[in-house]
Image (cartoon, grey):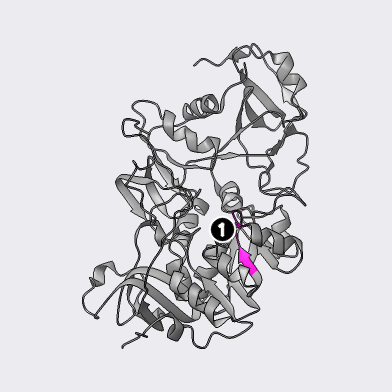
Amino acid sequence: MPLTKEQIAQRIARELRDGYYVNLGIGIPTLVANYIPEGINVVLQSENGLLGMGPFPIEGEEDPDLINAGKQTITTVPGSAFFDSAMSFGMIRAGKVDLTVLGAMEVSENGDIANWKIPGKMVKGMGGAMDLVASAKNIIVAMMHTNPKGESKLLPRCVLPLTGVKCVRKIVSDLAVLDVTPQGFKLLERAPGVSVEEIKMKTAGKLVIEGEILEMKF
Amino acid sequence: MNKTVTDAQEAIRDIHDGAILMLGGFGLCGIPENCIAALVTKGVKRLTCISNNAGVDDFGIGLMLQHKQVKKMISSYVGENAEFERQLLSGELEVELIPQGTLATRCMAAGYGMPAIFTPAGVGTEVATGKETRTFNGKDYLLEYAFDADFAIIKAWKGDTDGNLVYKETARNFNPLMAMAGKVTIAEVEELVPAGQLDPNNIHTPGIYVHRIFRGKNYQKRIEQRTIRKVNQSK
């Protein structure tokens, strides 16, 4: 069975290390906050100007002045700090943020990512994605392995306009965990019940398979 | 030095057709609601608006779009606005989409008196088209110019009559940067106090950057994505 969105988030959460400052993008990446492992302390950065993002508020405690980068109402945790947008992207550019998790429409075998524009269809803008991918030390992409037509989104080269070049380090898709290496996508783990053959078939970019590929456990 | 004006109408009195404006806020959070309403009433046209977002259909800069007052938007993200998309696709509206950090830093550069900055955001993408690239320590950077805006229109939480400002939570966002960057900076605040009543240790924007300040009225502070959790749910 391919992973659910929650399971993708859960698997990515295992990559968190104690003391990490983490920026979570909109969509599946946001769900990672729900699965932070016991004993691991991370600080969530929201690029609109907050370190120490907490869970959504309970009803009646929504504060219009307190939102995340997805414009959702949120709360803060003890020890949080507010700052302006230049400082926010300054800390991103300077490499202070340890891990960035974001979604993608396409990733190429050399780590290029496309996630902001579909020419003629979607003209919403890149937001902070280009800044994040250009500077983050470690980028994990959460994505579906294929599009609704069943076509691979892990490609030799991105077709859509790029968000950043040679920046993705790891991909957690609904089918597999893969590292982006100089040799191509290196298969590390597969979703429970998903065969290596299926992953091969659904990966258009170069796929490196070495040894036995274990199933993820949940 | 008293910077106070009576209301938004007086604050924006000399904003003219074709002006280049900076408008603070992120989404609908920390936007200058009173000044936007006054600009709509005044009916100035052909504006260039530098703002992270373009509001929603019936609020924020979306109101100015509805009245076809905007010639060009310079933003990082313009989703959630159908009228915007319509005007863009029909060619009525010119749009320059730039990375959010680049937008913030081009404001910052203007406020710090620097003509340009280098940033890696957009290297290797269509954002880099036609831009000068320089390599520092083996990494490529784009040259991006400081903005040059006629007016910065911003919103703060508290201000004093000298123009010192304090922002609240994530409503800070682009506001202090734009405050520093405008040739004329107009600040609307929820609470206006006599100079001397704000703690000098906690001023976010010193009054030197602010030319006009007034207490705004009837703030709606709309929430774009009201998201809540159940009481017993931890996350």
Question: Residue sitting at 57 percent across and 64 percent down?
Answer: B103
Residue B110 higher or lower than B224, as above or below: below
Residue B112 shows up from this direction:
no
Q: Quadrant of residue B197?
A: bottom left
Image position, residue B67 (x, y; %): 62, 72
Disc 1: host chain: B
Q: Position of residue A91 (x, y in %)?
A: 46, 53
User: In front: B173, or A185?
Assistant: B173
Q: Amino acid at mark 1?
A: Gln
Q: Is residue A190 magenta?
A: no
Write down the region rendered in magenta: B73-81
Residue B140 horizontal side relative to residue B199, left or right:
right
Is disc 1 placed on a helix, strand or loop?
helix
SS assignment for the magenta stretch, majority: loop
- Relative placement, left or right, of A160 versus B50 is right
The residue beneath circle 1 is: B100
Quadrant assignment, res A185 = top right
